[in-house]
Image (cartoon, grey):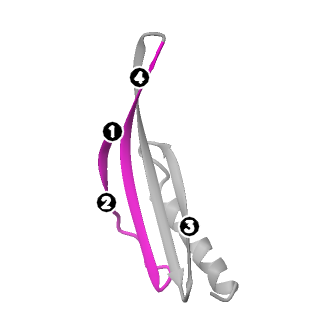
Amino acid sequence: TVVNHGKIEFPRLAPRTAAFRIVVRMVVTQNGQTTTVPLTLHIVVVGRGRAEAGFLSFAPSPGIAGTDLRAFGKLLAERMKAAGF
């Protein structure tokens, strides 16, 4: 079940930058026992020139820390720029 979704604030790391969060609740039943697992999906996309790249993180809620998402995004944008994009 999707609990929450939408765009999140994220620093502008390249000419085009977007970040989204989707929070889901997964219900698992095994051997007659039901467990609810909260999960968070983060999607970060950066674009420069004709290139676009991004990454996904999927982890138990609350998900990957915002500081880590920004660090990964910054690394991605820097590598795109160094590659000539």
Image position, residue 85 (x, y; %): 62, 87
Numbered badge on residue 1: 1
The residue that disc 2 covers is 6
Circle 2: residue type: Gly
Image position, residue 19 (x, y; %): 42, 66
Which is more foreground, mark 3 or mark 4?
4
Residue 54 is a magenta residue: no
* Disc 2 residue crowd, few under 14, some 14–19, many 20+, Cα 10 Å: few
CA gap between label 2 and label 3 equals 21 Å
Numbered badge on residue 39: none
Which residue is at 58% across, 77% downward?
A: 77
First of labels 3, 4 by sequence position: 4
Which residue is at 50% across, 44% downward?
A: 59
Relative horizontal placement of residue 26, taking residue 68 as reference (left or right): left
* Disc 1 residue crowd, few under 14, some 14–19, many 20+, Cα 10 Å: few
Relative horizontal placement of residue 19, taking residue 83 as reference (left or right): left
Circle 1: residue type: Thr
The residue that disc 3 covers is 71
Which is more foreground, mark 2 or mark 1?
1
Relative horizontal placement of residue 23, taking residue 83 as reference (left or right): left
CA gap between label 2 and label 1 equals 15 Å
First of labels 4, 2 by sequence position: 2
- Of helix, strand and loop, which one carries label 1? loop
Q: Are marks 4 and 1 in contact (CB under 8 Å)?
A: no
Image position, residue 10 (x, y; %): 40, 70
The residue that disc 4 covers is 35
Circle 4: residue type: Thr
Look at the image and give the residue range highlighted in magenta.
Answer: 1-30
> 50 or 20, which lies in front?
50
